[in-house]
Amino acid sequence: MNKLSWFILMCLVCGTVVLASIIIRQSNQSSEAVRKPIDIPTLSQESVGIKQDAVDQKKESKTLLTGVKTETLMKNRPFMVMVNNHPSARPQSGLSSADIIYEILAEGEITRLLAIFQSEEVQGSIGPVRSIRPYFIDLAMSYDAIPIHAGGSPDAYNILSNQSIQSLDEITNAGPFFWRESFRKAPHNLYTSFKNIEEGIDKKGYRNQIHEKSIYTFLLNKSNDIGERVSLFNVTFLIEDYKVTYQYDANSNKYLRSINGVPHVDMNNNEQLTASNVVVLGTDHKVLDNEGRLQVKLMDSGPALLYQNGIMKKVEWKRDQINTPIRLYEQGQEIAFVPGKIHFLIVPTKPTFEAHITY
């Protein structure tokens, strides 16, 4: 091969190598472009977590005192109205909207109803409103509830004053937020309303935000707890012919309340009062004076009956700290309530606790 031919051959070889190198390099660059992730804006884990928490919170929001799921969670502080339960005061107004009702003796062998409101706005009036007692204040404070009343015993006024308890009293500090109706005679005709109470709380500058996220634990599903099936039971306090009855309705899983065989209804809507949980508990009652004023022991522990899901359970009530509510226990474990309204009926332990309940 002559020198010219050799030179031409070498040029062809070098050109082929260079061309192959360029092709390989372009191919690699193309592959890298394919493998490179596309730069798409994404939400951080923290942002996703916040959004998910918001969804979960909306999905799982429950009312403070009844554990009922809701999408319109009210954050107002509870208030407790002292409601007259004399026969001349029935039917009362607003009770069907109460989250929790306590029935407890005042003097004179007639009970008083302490109605705690928080989860829903009452449509219509609330009452008739009556006076307050020291153990009523104790129960109100156990739920961080503002007491709503008309007057009170001397001991109750001392407690309200000495402890600077925020309350709305028709007689001393909140008269304009109450009114009297003409269709009943005093003292069975004093009323207020949800709107008036809210305005009174705002006018007085009281705190109106809840402290606690929950008060009790609630069952997620209908429980199959072991107990005695009881569909109807009666409770008497002191007067034999004054009998409160609860009838279990399996369709609604609620207990319907009657007094002396007559449905106990709310005058606002003519609906019979119902509860998903009824608690009858016994404790010591002591007469303090000639007026028949009582001292009712609400600390320590004692016997109780819990009615829920058509079943009666013998349990124990306990309360060992001020500003905490009465709780129920079985074999040392706190009992959960069925989501819904709760009625507590507090009876004396004399002659015996059991003597006040029949079924």
Image (tube, rainbow, N blue to C red):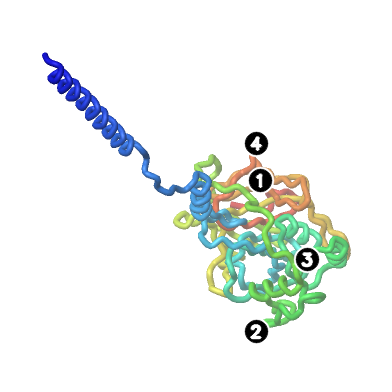
Q: Is residue 250 visible?
A: yes
Few, some or many residues within 10 Å of mark 4 (<14, 14–19, 20+) = few
Give the residue at mark 1.
328
Give the residue at mark 4.
331
Nearest to viewer (mark 2 / mark 4): 4
Residue 84: x %, y % from top left: 70, 70
Disc 3 marks a residue whose amino acid type is: Gln
Few, some or many residues within 10 Å of mark 3 (<14, 14–19, 20+) = some
Residue 203: x %, y % from top left: 74, 74
Residue 326: x %, y % from top left: 70, 50
In front here: 3 or 345?
Answer: 3
In front here: 135 or 272?
Answer: 135
Residue 248: x %, y % from top left: 52, 55
Disc number for residue 320: none
Few, some or many residues within 10 Å of mark 1 (<14, 14–19, 20+) = many
Nearest to viewer (mark 3 / mark 1): 3
Give the residue at mark 3.
166
Q: Are marks 1 and 4 in contact (CB under 8 Å)?
A: no
Q: How many angstroms separate mark 3 from mark 4 (CA)?
A: 37 Å
